[in-house]
Amino acid sequence: MVSRCANLPCPATFRYLREGRLFHVPMESAPPEKGTRVERFWLCGDCSTKVTIVPHSSGIAVVPLEKEAKHRKRSINASRRQDSPAGA
């Protein structure tokens, strides 16, 4: 159950869905026959303007929005390079 902001230094407690951002993160530790287990994490309104939640090998990581955007851009560019024909 979500009870507080996933950003550990933040003391905000969860009260309403209308404030902040709720994340549904697939966790790989579930046995394959049971399907993918989803855990929910919440960032308060203040933290959700500065950081985001990304999947990590140990569960989740709370990262600044700028770093997450750069990571996505690198992933998209790498994907495009793999998809482009040789010599193009």
Image (spheres, rainbow, N blue to C red):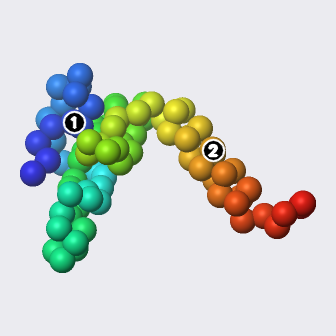
Judge left or right: residue 25 versus residue 31. right
Q: What residue is drawn where x is 66% and y is 51%?
A: 78
Pick whichever, 8 or 32, lies toward us.
32
The C terminus is located in which quarter?
bottom right
Q: Amino acid at mark 2?
A: Arg
Residue 83's quadrant in the figure? bottom right
Q: Find the residue positioned furthest to the top.
A: 9
Residue 52 visible? The answer is yes
Say which mark, if any, is on residue 5: 1
Q: In this rendering, which labeled residue sits more in front, label 2 or label 1?
A: 2
Q: Residues within 10 Å of mark 2 (few under 14, many from 20)?
A: few
Q: Amino acid at mark 1?
A: Cys
- The residue located at (34%, 44%) in the rendering is 56
Image position, residue 45 (x, y; %): 32, 37
* Left or right, 50 with reference to 87: left
Query: What is the CA distance from the residue labelled 2 to the residue labelled 1?
Result: 28 Å
Mark sitting on residue 74: 2
Across and down, in percent, residue 62 comes to 34, 35
Q: Secondary structure at mark 2?
A: helix
Judge whether 14 appears above or below 81 on screen: above
Point out the tag, 2 or 1, that comes first from the N-terminus: 1
- The residue located at (26%, 45%) in the rendering is 59
The answer to which of 85 and 43 lies nearer the viewer is 85
Asked if the residue under mark 1 is in contact with the one under mark 2, i.e. CB atoms within 8 Å, the reply is: no
Residue at the extreme front: 86
Please indicate, yes or no, whether residue 48 appears anywhere in the rendered image: no
